[in-house]
Image (spheres, rainbow, N blue to C red):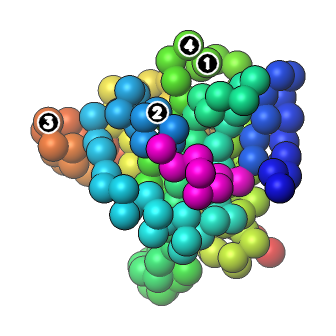
Amino acid sequence: MQIINHQTGDYIIRHCELGDLIPVMEINLKTLPEHYSDYFYESLLAELPEAFMVAEHQGKLVGYIMCKSEYGFSNFKKLGFVKKGHVVSVAVLEEYRKKGLGKAIIEECIQGIKSKRCDELYLEVRCSNNDAVRLYEKIGFVIKQRLKAYYRDGEDAFLMAIEFTY
């Protein structure tokens, strides 16, 4: 049974299910140069289903976000080992952008990350992706560093993060 987490007009934001993975992979192939194995999607869904969200329009998946959790050095404190969420991939089909879906799936993902008591959430984004950087900043992410030649094509990435207080 599908439970709607959030509704924006005709769009539904909900948790990803196993049967959603092929459409999620198709969205990834259409929108992003980074691709993953089938097993990778399955493992992220199994590891952190609370933060693997999809956007749906009239029964068609049009966006997704998937994360993992890990322990590591904080992006905010000089010293400190913390539990943090990592946005592995987020995408919305081009024809469905600028409708609030990206913001909605990220905000629902944040709720999932918080439910696992993570101290922060971080992601990498292409420095040239101004729309995404602005969206993340609106949600509360801050640029913490520039990662030189992060992507396979040599482009730099911004590491952006948001810290949670409980």
User: Main SS type for the magenta part?
Assistant: helix
Tag on residue 27? Answer: 2
User: Mark 3 — residue?
Assistant: 153
Which badge, 3 or 4, is on the more N-terminal residue? 4
Q: Is residue 81 above or below residue 147?
A: below
User: Mark 1 — residue?
Assistant: 96
Q: Disc 4 vs disc 1: Cβ atoms closer than 8 Å?
A: yes
Q: Amino acid at mark 1?
A: Tyr
Q: Residues within 10 Å of mark 3 (few under 14, many from 20)?
A: few
Q: Quadrant of residue 111?
A: bottom right
Q: Is residue 73 above or below residue 65?
A: below
Closer to us: 40 or 141: 40
Q: Residue drawn at (78%, 28%), measured in percent from left and top?
A: 11
Front: mark 2 or 4? 2
Q: Quadrant of residue 83?
A: bottom right
Q: Secondary structure at mark 3?
A: loop
Q: Amino acid at mark 4?
A: Glu
Residue 126 placement, left or right of 142: left
Q: Disc 3 vs disc 4: Cβ atoms closer than 8 Å?
A: no
Q: Amino acid at mark 3?
A: Asp
Q: Position of residue 160 (x, y in %)?
A: 47, 51
Which badge, 3 or 1, is on the more N-terminal residue? 1
Q: Secondary structure at mark 2?
A: helix
Which badge, 2 or 4, is on the more N-terminal residue? 2
Q: Residues within 10 Å of mark 4 (few under 14, many from 20)?
A: few
For the C terminus, the quadrant is bottom right
